[in-house]
Image (tube, rainbow, N blue to C red):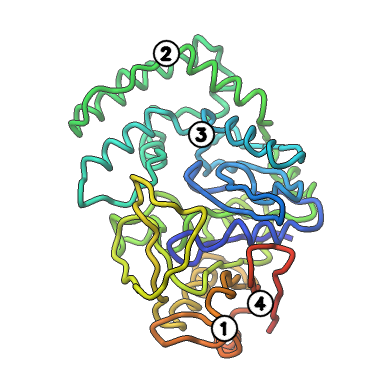
Amino acid sequence: MYYAVIGNNYGDEGKGLAVDHLTLSGHNLVVRHNGGAQAAHTVDREDKRFVFHELSSGSFNGADTYWASTFLPDLYKLEEEINEFAKVSSDKVRIYASPDCAVTLLYDVYLNQKREESRGADKHGSCGMGIWEATKRSAGDYKLTLGDIASLSIDDLAKKIKLIEAEYVALKTAKFGIGESLDLDTVKYASILKEALENNVTLVSDEKSLFESYDNVIFEGGQGLLLDTAREDLWPHTTCSRTNITNPVSILGALDLKLDEAVYVTRTYLTRHGAGPFEEDPDLLFSDETNKPNPWQGSMRLGRHGAVSDLILRAVNDCRDNCPYEVRTSMFLTHLNETSDKLLSSDGNIALSDLERMAFDKGIGKLYLSRDKYALNVRTAVK
């Protein structure tokens, strides 16, 4: 089976929980395909908890991770995550990757943070992790891929990094008036990147054979539909990647494979962590252990969904409009326990029974229902 897990809103919907649930049984591969280390997908067990960034949110279940060519890994941060995961789990981490993945560099993080700081009250809502800058840099002559890192000697890799610093980064710092660039020891940095890749990642040239060697392949999306780069109506408070179904459909299509189910995740209330228009509801006082206030995104804001029909049709239309064949469209509702089995919207507090009826009438084929933070306790309702 081929699944895509997609955030239906502004991110922070519970995608980690959804992936954890879908990988509870079988031999599974989880594909990270958009964004990079800015993701923060939480998975809870009764005795442990972990926030995943570049690793699969199915890792507690032994699911392997694959970085598709549209993912932007940060090798500098990878070993930190692997080491932290080893403190809470004895499960072996296995990462496979396309050699065409463009990497996020420390320069991208630096530029990203400095540019966001310079915007003052007009912040775009960046996570400060360099994804936007890495995307822009990689679209031109200064792209650095996993394949490059694997094939180049440390000295040659250091020279390429130095070239990026001397030409691209210097141009950016001058253009945006953000001061001097980072003063990196490029040989040491090249060694760190090369070691992180060689020690932790297996490059794959035959994606189809890899995918077909697993019982299930789950595409784990980052962020949400309302942050998709194609949402020009919401610019500039969007991301630079495709947060919708586009990448999974495209990646599978190139291999003559098809998606079986698209799972759109939403909390029963609306959240936004980062700048951009948002109507807060001061009466909502829910807490979130993962999304603490930070300098880049501020505090998590809580509100009500718009019309229920809009929430449902956002998922249905994304699947219908961006996939050339019929796919089961599902919704995964999280945090039901916090709202007493109701969806909070501008239509009022919608009882779960009414929501099920509306969802099934509008084209949703399956509902996943989560009343706590544990994947084992998720229940389903089918049309």
Q: Nearer the viewer, residue 306 or 138?
A: 306
**Label of residue 74 in the image:** 3
Q: Quadrant of the N terminus?
A: bottom right
Q: Please give the name of the residue rendered at 60% of the width and 60% of the height, measured from the top-left corner.
A: 5
Residue in the picture at 48% in, 18% down: 189
The reply to whether the C-beta atoms of the residues labelled 4 and 3 are less than 8 Å apart is: no
Asked which quadrant contains residue 192, the reply is top right
Earlier-in-chain disc, 2 versus 4: 2
Q: Amino acid at mark 3?
A: Asp
Secondary element under disc 2, as helix, strand or loop, is loop
Q: Amino acid at mark 1?
A: Ala
Separation (CA) of disc 2 from disc 1: 55 Å
* Label 2 sits on residue: 185
**Mark 1 or 4 closer to N-term?**
1
Tag 1 near tag 3, CB within 8 Å: no
Q: CA distance from mark 4 to mark 3?
A: 35 Å
- Residue at 33 percent across and 52 percent down: it is 125
| Left or right for 132, reference 41 | left
Q: Amino acid at mark 4?
A: Lys
The answer to which of 144 and 295 lies nearer the viewer is 295
Q: Identity of the amino acid at label 2? A: Asp
Q: Work out whether mark 3 precedes mark 2 in sequence or the reverse, and give the earlier one.
A: 3
